[in-house]
Amino acid sequence: MLLRILFFLVFIGLIDWYSFQAFKTLFPTQTWIKAGFWVFSILIYLFTIYVFLTFDRGNVSLNFGRLVSLLVLSILPKLIILAFLFGEDIFRFFTGIFQSMSGNKDGDFLPDRRKFVSQTALVLSAIPFLGILHGVLIGKYRYRVVNHTLEFEDLPEEFDGFTITQISDIHSGSFDNKQKLEYGVDLINQQKSDIILFTGDLVNNHSGEMEPWIETFKKLEAPMGKYSILGNHDYGDYMAWPSKEAKVANLQRLFQIQEELGFKLLRNESVQLQKLALSGVEGATASIDLIGVENWGKGFAQYGDLKKATANLSDQSFKILMSHDPSHFDEKVKSFSQFIHLTLSGHTHGMQFGIEIPGIIKWSPASLRYPKWAGLYEELGRYLHVNRGFGFLAFPGRVGIWPEITVLKLKRK
């Protein structure tokens, strides 16, 4: 552990030393500015040591989130400065070689740094700094409602106009503002959808993280019910338990919490959503199948069993699947023997960082790992929607990828 801390501190120390050269160039006589740079950096070093030495995955404190925020705020802008200065140093190096070869021996081998380059680097580094600061202070609770209308030829006529509100990745262990959270829950209810579907990751590591927020999320309402599945974080696989029994007890408590919230947890099973038939025949109903599988992810635990979940379903029925990880769609769902009309996933969070301008650009580092990382996709007549997540994890902020409440309206084509 100590060796890792030392290596990390050396790494960020080198970044600080290099980016400090821009401050030296721009403020050669302003000692207080240069001193402030190092005071801020040293305080981050000390806080890093403290958080690493007191870190407990089973009880992640807000200090860990604060550290991640400070490191991102500090390092990312400095990397931009570093890129400019390193490019200038390459130019200075070859200029020095050229001067030496041409017989010019006056002055130092390397020309002085140009003030313009340092100014440009500092100005450009302020852009991500302000963006990250906004993401930490405001962006993580900047809930937005995303609407999609999907048309299907074989949707039962009774379900024409049926609305679904999808939320995903609550990660209750990260919340730090009850008022903002209650606003998000109220916003979900304002959509007045027929059904609410939650696609996994209620907690970060253990069920106790949800205890303070049970009363808040119990307020969610939908006339045709609330259904949920498990995400990779819900199993407690990412922390060391004192015994197997303790891990099992934690998962059982998570199941109880789902019930207390009013959610029907689907674990490799399905339910029929029914409406009275329009035929006028007394007692006749029309239905669609809602399927929920446990987590199945490429590179993650694969508890999901799609065959088991659909074993008793008709091949001709209209099907909606909840599966936490979108990689399940490409690996299994789209080629599954039964036609699944709509799959709802989450998991990626859009990395909580990216750029989205409709019709112009849509990018996040999540795209390097997940081809389908956020939004609506269609392949072979099957739809996949990847929710960007309601909460946040590790980095306590969102930059360009806002917390999402999805409303999907199903229409008969």
Image: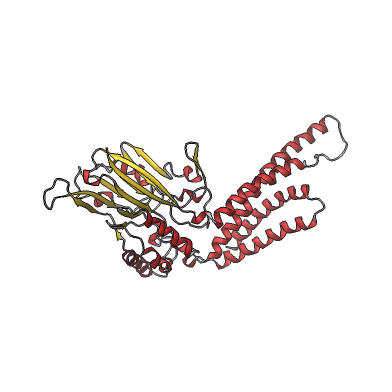
Asked whether, in this view, residue 100 is left or right of residue 117, the answer is right
Residue 305 image point, x, y percent: 29, 51
Q: Is residue 204 visible?
A: no
Residue that sits furthest to the left in the current view = 282
Residue 194: % across, % down: 30, 53
Q: Which residue is rendered at x = 41% and y = 44% of the image? A: 375
**Which is nearer the eye, 129 or 222?**
222
> Is any atom of residue 31 visible in this view?
yes
Q: Residue at x 69, y 53 (%)?
A: 16
Quarter in which the N terminus is drawn: bottom right
Q: Is 153 located above or below residue 223 in the figure?
A: above
As drawn, 266 above or below 247: above
Taking the spot 47% from the left edge, 36% from the top edge, the residue there is 359
The answer to whether 412 appears left or right of 29 in the picture is left
Q: Nearer the viewer, residue 411 or 62?
A: 411
Across and down, in percent, residue 127 comes to 62, 47
